[in-house]
Every structure is written in C-alpha cells, then in structure tokens.
Image: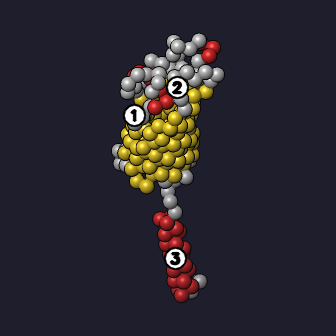
Amino acid sequence: MTSRGIRITALALGMGLAGTAMARERDPKQGDVNVFVGGGIGGYTGDLGGLSATGPTWGVTLNLQPYKMLGFEVGYDGSKNDVTDDRFRAAEAPSLMRHGATSLVKLSPPFMERVRPFVGAGLGVSYVYVRGAGNGPYSSDLMEELPLAAGVEFNSGALTAGIRGTYRVLVDDNFADAAVPGDASGGILGTNLTVGGRF
C-alpha cells in the first residue's frame, strides 16, 4: 500500500471513530428513562386510620432522570382499604377504593447511581370510591394530596428495582366528613417494592 493509501485509510478510520463518538454523545444514556411497577401495603393515618384497615397498594410510574441528582416522576397509584367503623356490621362494611395520579420531583446524591437513595415531593389527586352495599356516612369524592417520598433504587444495566415509603398529606378528605365530625386528621402512608426497566 502506498503512503497516500495509508493516509486515506487512516483518515477514513479517524472519521469513522469520530462519527461513532459523536453518535454516542447524541444518544441518551441508559437510565435517562425508567418505567416500573410497584406493589405493597398502605393505609390511612390519624382519625381516618382508626376507621379503616391496612390494605394493598399498586401502581405504575414513568421516571425521567436528566441528571444523576435530579429526577421527575409521573404515575398512577391505587389502594384498597376496608372500613372498620363500628357503625357497620362486619359483613356490610364498605371498602375505600382509591385511584390517583401523582407527580414527583426527586433529589439524589450526584455521585451514586447503582445504589441511589432519594427523597421527593410533589402534587397528587385521587378519587376515592366507596364500594359496598351500604356506604353509611362515607361518600365517593375527589381529593388533593401532597406526596412526600423517600427510598432507595438499585440500578444495573437495563433493570431497576427499589423500595420506597410515601406519605400523602391530604389537602381535603371530604369522603369522610360525615363519619368524623369536624376536620378529620390523617393522611395516607404506604410502603412499596418496585421493579422495572431502564432506557
């Protein structure tokens, strides 16, 4: 091969490597987008906790992670809690079915990715449906929430898993106004395990 051919080959290889590097920089890194499902247990606290039992929770979440220390979540979550109010016979007590939408801003240490602890706060809204033969003093209602979350995520390649606790401050709880005279105290406390994929 002539010296001119060697120079042309070297130039082509250099351009190819540069193009590959530029393409990698343009492509989003794995972990920028996480999708996961979760399940666990949760229940109402305060006055509302004295009238209902702990029950199952579930949900699905989309997490955007533009920076290692900053993330944004939007998701659906639900729960089921049986009413334990003494004003009902055991067989006639209704259940509180909750379906909610939540947005969350998350903060994490910037130097941790494989094992990432986080705290978060946001806004949410839920519809509580009172299911049962006799609703008594409870009525279905839409309520606003302020979710506060803390947990740890475990990331490896295309997989993510974690455990988190969430406390939802209830801005209103009108579904139980007739059951608890005055302004009922309480929120919603839950613990979830999560598993999903990273893209």
Which mark is nearer the camera, 1 or 3?
Answer: 1
Residue plotted at (47% across, 65% down): 25
**In the rendered image, which quarter is residue 184 located in?**
top left
Residue tagged by mark 2?
A: 138
Q: What residue type is labelled 1?
A: Val
Which mark is drawn over residue 15?
Answer: 3
Q: How many labels does the image show?
A: 3
Q: In what element is the residue under mark 2?
A: loop
Give amino acid for label 2: Tyr
Name the quarter where the N terminus is drawn. bottom right
Q: x and y percent of residue 157 in the render?
A: 53, 47
Residue at position x 64%, y 22% in the image? 133
Lower position in the chain sequence, tag 1 or tag 3: 3
CA neighbours of label 2 inside 10 A, class few (<14), some (14 to 19), many (20+): many
User: In the rendered view, how is the structure colored?
Assistant: secondary structure
Left or right side of 62 for 119:
left
| Residue 58 in view (yes/no) | yes
Above/below status of 125 relative to 66: above
At a point 51% along the width and 22% down the height, the residue shown is 137
Q: How far apart are marks 1 and 3 (CA)?
A: 57 Å
Between tags 2 and 1, which lies in front? 2
Mark 3 / mark 2, whichever is N-terminal: 3
Q: Observer-nearest residue: 114 or 71?
A: 71
Q: Could you tell me residue 11's position as x and y percent?
A: 51, 80
Residue 117 showing in the rendered view: no
Q: Name the residue under label 1.
A: 169
The answer to whether 137 is drawn above or below residue 30 in the figure is above
CA distance separating discs 2 and 1: 19 Å
- Secondary structure under tag 1 reads strand
What residue is drawn where x is 48% and y is 19%? Answer: 51
Q: Residue type at mark 3?
A: Met
Instruction: Judge the density around disc 1: few (<14), some (14-19), many (≥20) Cα neighbours within 10 Å.
Output: some
